[in-house]
Image (cartoon, rainbow, N blue to C red):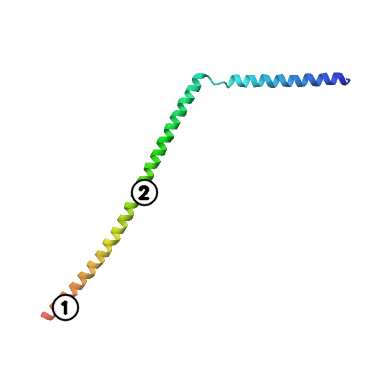
Amino acid sequence: MDRTETLIAVMVLLFGAFLLGFLTHWVVTRLSRVSDAELGQLDSMAEELHRAEEERDAALALHHRAEHKQRGEAGELRSELKLTREALRQSRAEAEELRAYIEAQSQRGL
């Protein structure tokens, strides 16, 4: 095989590879083409997804507000409980003092 025949053989091989690539690309684009109906369906799905994301964000914001409010109320309840316990402790101490005073008075009276 001389130089000209080798050059022609390489050109034919390259042209064949080009044709094979072109045909493959054409087949793939034909098979994966999206119709107008599918595009409309994709648009409606995108709108539904957008609405769902907005609803999720609104629900999360509501949840965070409710959680913040509950934490504040829980803090208030803790402080009220602490004050109530302290008042109960003082009342018990006063009751013990009164019992001791009454016992002392009853001891003197006998």
Q: Is residue 106 above or below residue 57?
A: below
Q: For residue 104, which numbered disc appears in the image?
A: 1
- The numbered disc on residue 83 is none
Left or right for 49, reference 25: left
Quadrant for the C terminus in the image:
bottom left
Q: Is residue 70 left or right of residue 4?
A: left
Which mark identifies residue 68?
2
Q: Is residue 73 left or right of residue 93?
A: right
Above/below status of 80 relative to 53: below
Residue visible at 57% across and 20% down in the picture:
33
Q: Amino acid at mark 2?
A: His
User: Crowdedness of circle 1 by 10 Å Cα count: few (<14), some, many (20+)?
Assistant: few
Q: Quadrant of the N terminus?
A: top right
- The secondary structure type at the circle numbered 1 is helix
- Name the residue: 66% across, 21% down: 24
The amino acid beneath tag 1 is Ala
Q: Nearer the viewer, mark 2 or mark 1?
A: 2
Residue drawn where x is 85% and y is 18% of the image: 5
Q: Closer to the camera, 60 or 101?
A: 60
Query: Which image quadrant for residue 82?
Result: bottom left
Residue 28: x %, y % from top left: 62, 21
